[in-house]
Image (tube, rainbow, N blue to C red):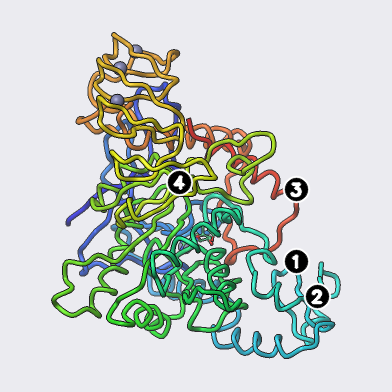
Amino acid sequence: MATSRDRLGTLEAEGSSGRQGYSGVEVVLSSDPATPAPLCPHGPTLMFVKVNQGKEETRRFYACSACRDRKDCSFFQWEDEKLSGARLAAREAHNRSCQPPLSRSQCVERYLKFIELPLSQRKFCQSCQQLLLPDDEEKHHEHQVVGDVSITQLKRPSKLLYPLENKKTNAQYLFADRSCLFLVDLLSNLGFRRVLCVGTPRLHELIRLKESGGTKSNIRSLLLDIDFRYSQFYMEDSFCHYNMFNHHFFDGKAALEVCKTFLQEDKGEGVIMVTDPPFGGLVEPLAVTFKKLIAMWKEGHSQDNSQKELPIFWIFPYFFESRICQFFPSFCMLDYQVDYDNHALYKHGKTGRKQSPVRIFTNIPPNKIILPIEEGYRFCPLCQRYVSLENQHCEHCNSCTSKDGRKWNHCFLCKKCVKPSWIHCSICNHCALPDHSCKGPKDGCFICGELDHKRSACPNISTSKKVNKAVRKQKQRKSNKMKMETTKGQSMNHTSATRKKKRRERTHQYLCS
Ligand code: SAH
Ligand code: ZN
Ligand code: ZN
Ligand code: ZN
Ligand code: ZN
């Protein structure tokens, strides 16, 4: 079996960065079509293996690709486990029962009825996150219902719906208007006519808003997202209920065809894919999915175009640079800092702004991508790309080396630029934080156990630290509770208290050094 790995720190990372050894769960991607993975409500599951102290245990298991929390999807099966017919049937029934109550075409039908209603009858139930038709009202009379839903509001569902912030599944962080407008203008200036939005609902709606506003932009957009609440607001040709961790279309072949047609139109010319996946890890299954979308786009090509690549914007934290470039060597990371609305830390604020660690990875030549001067970017003629003002060109490295927006310093012993907070440690023989512990592992990296690099060079360093912290905190909180319950689909009831708590948990996970 051809296997490859991805660190899945969020699943079961244990211990702190100061500990000798690492325990965790890694995803094992099999390319063997003879043993298809069993299905959970979110499509084909992924195979995982437990790793202790860098050594893997041999028994592998299947778990949900989309939900990294057992309470969102409880699927579990050992690789070698044989299930009885009765259990398989029960599983199938369970999978069916987890699907959205309405079919895609029923949603469209409801939407068409809804927009025909007079303003005074257009209601939205906040408790159920649902547009209501007159017949539904009775069922919702004790719920939080807002009335007079305008067409303008219908065109901005990401403002009507609350963001699903559970970090382990949806991790819905919506673009701040500034970043979203920047993206729409950029796409239009680059001449794209179609945008495949994978997990970017707010970008999708802004593209459509500009389009219908009759301004210059002439761009169409198709949204693929696992959040089926969006199916209430869009026709079949502009939204597909989709899982980006296993390339699963919940509405089967018809939805897959929508996506295929969209990518292959105009012989594949003028289309770009923009994606902003949850930051919880899983780079490899995402890369596998994106390669499938690329292949779908390529099928519609004539032979002479075979060298061309599907243009992509993959929005992700900068510390994933080496992982992403490993799978997509033609990608480079732009210096632009992507800001979010519901992310207190990465918001542009009056009190001074915490810099966002989120960047755009792309195969479009960076010299074509103009970053806004008024937001503090400048063009570096030597690097032939736009960089942030603080990112100074290092004559020794011959590049603008900063990754995090701060000014980095060149270390002549390490022969490279390093973060301003680091100093050279003669024991470790490289630069590190002044208060680091020099007792690193004798053999290999103690985050991932690989022998070819040390912890400091581990592509997972920033995430695993945060994840470990978050996991420890969570463990304390849950200490006496073993949560094994099964929840049906995504719960739509949310109190503001749990939302606040989730916000706090998220803060721990996504802060970067
Ligand atoms: N910044 C983007 C939103 C990114 S948040 C914007 O403003 O448009 C991540 C998005 O990915 C959310 O919309 C979430 O619903 C979606 N998502 C999370 N898990 C997913 C999965 N497994 N498959 C597809 N979409 C997913
Ligand atoms: Zn699942
Ligand atoms: Zn340098
Ligand atoms: Zn150094
Ligand atoms: Zn040291």
Bin the neighbour count of mark 1 within 10 Å (Cα to Cα): few under 14, some 14-19, many 20 and up.
some
The residue to which callout 4 is attached is 336
Looking at numbered disc 1 in the image, what kind of residue is underneath it?
Ser
CA gap, disc 4 and disc 3: 34 Å
CA gap, disc 1 and disc 4: 37 Å
In primary-sequence order, the first of circles 1 and 3 is 1
Please tell me which residue is depicted at 50% across the width and 63% down the height of the picture. 184
Q: Are marks 1 and 3 in contact (CB under 8 Å)?
A: no
Task: Mark 1 and ligand 1: say if the CB distance to the nearest ligand atom is below 8 Å.
Answer: no
The residue to which callout 2 is attached is 140
Q: Position of residue 218 (x, y in %)?
A: 48, 77
**Quadrant that contains the N terminus:** bottom left
Please tell me which residue is depicted at 34% across the width and 45% down the height of the picture. 385
Residue occupying the far top of the picture: 426
Quarter location, residue 403: top left
Q: Secondary structure at mark 2?
A: helix
- Please determine whether, in this image, residue 216 is positioned above or below residue 11: below
CA gap, disc 3 and disc 2: 22 Å
The residue to which callout 3 is attached is 497
Between 393 and 325, the one lying in front of the other is 393
Looking at numbered disc 3 in the image, what kind of residue is underneath it?
Ala
The residue to which callout 1 is attached is 127
Q: Position of residue 511 (x, y in %)?
A: 53, 36
